[in-house]
Amino acid sequence: MFYHQVFGLRCTSDIELPAFLASDTGADFEVKIVTQLPEFESAPTVTKPFSWYNEREFGYKVPDIATYFVRDGKEILICPVSEDWASILLFFYSNAIAALLFQRNLIPFHVSGVLQGDGVWLLSAPSRTGKSTTALKLQERGYPLFTDDTALVFMENGRCMAIPSYPMIRAWRATLENQEAYDKGAAFQIRAEVEKYGIHFHEQFQATAMPVKGIIYLQEQGSEISISSLKPSLGMQHLGNNVYRRQWVMGMNKQLMQFRLITSIAKKVPFWMASRPKGKKTFAEFSEAIDSQIFASYGK
């Protein structure tokens, strides 16, 4: 039995989960390897070729890899059909855990983040827009990495807070080659068919919740780098579009919860838009602009 921590939750697991933090106990949910998955207790509200789910139960199939079953935010069952454990864990990290969070009424967002003093700046954007590269460039400027790709964002005692996912960077080859924050030799290919690499940073990982200083949306647009503040209404729209696995929200009956959370966040944190030219290697200049035009205004 292995004990791990992720998103502030503790779990027991039949297998070691290398991307997660080690823990001395597991009380929130369990991960089991099985040879057969149970039937749903209630009919799915959504049925698609590779996923089927309702508010309490979630099924997900990756052909020739594994099928996953998540129930009540308390258990994840994995039924492998291959020995490709790198791929089995990849889909476990990215999909099964997200389903479990929704079942626990927790909303994951598609964000990277860096620390500044006693808070965190979240960088939000669709995949392949440059979240990870920008975060790594900001780390090179002295802002430690908080999370890569996902985080929980929630309200607590009137403050907007974030909890990081787990200490693994998932970087495309171009991102890996365009950073000096981590040893490239420590990177490993996440899946044989995909040019994406993992880098663990367990020793530097800040696992506790941190106040959110602001949310910066990244986009590739125009011919010059530009930074501008956003009105709360527009920030809310972008934030809703960057809920992680947002296509599941309606089928899992989380629409109202999501709306209330995003509305509350918009009342407490500033939103920014940071744009850079598409297809140009401007990440060093881009991170400098974010630092000087946003971070510097909020002190250390």
Image: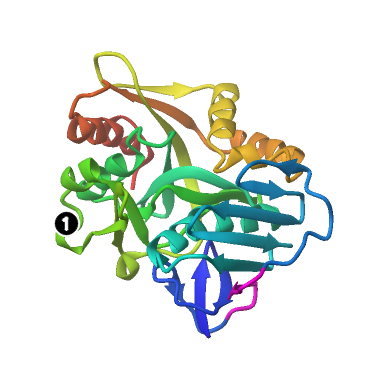
The way the protein has been coloured in the rendering is rainbow
The extreme top residue here reads 223
Is residue 35 left or right of 254 when viewed as pictured?
A: left
Residue 174 vertical position relative to residue 85 in the rendered view, above or below: above
- The part of the image, by quadrant, that contains residue 182 is bottom left
Residue 262 vertical position relative to residue 120 in the rendered view, above or below: above
Q: Check residue 28 for magenta coloring.
A: yes
- Label 1 crowd bin: few (<14), some (14–19), many (20+), radius 10 Å: some
Rendered location of residue 135, percent (x, y): 31, 44
The residue where tag 1 is placed is 184
Is residue 109 left or right of 73 when viewed as pictured?
A: left
- The part of the image, by quadrant, that contains residue 298 is top left
Residue closest to the eye, 209 or 96: 96
Residue closest to the eye, 105 or 97: 97
Residue 121 vertical position relative to residue 59 in the rendered view, above or below: above
Is residue 75 left or right of 108 when viewed as pictured?
A: right
Residue located 44% across and 68% down the image: 20
Magenta span: 26-36
Residue closest to the eye, 91 or 122: 91
Rendered location of residue 35, percent (x, y): 61, 73
Q: Amino acid at mark 1?
A: Lys
Secondary structure state at the residue bearing disc 1: helix
The extreme right residue here reads 42
Q: How many marks?
A: 1
Residue located 73% across and 46% down the image: 252
Residue closest to the eye, 57 or 33: 33
Residue located 62% across and 68% down the image: 77
Rendered location of residue 57, percent (x, y): 73, 57
Q: Check residue 30 for magenta coloring.
A: yes
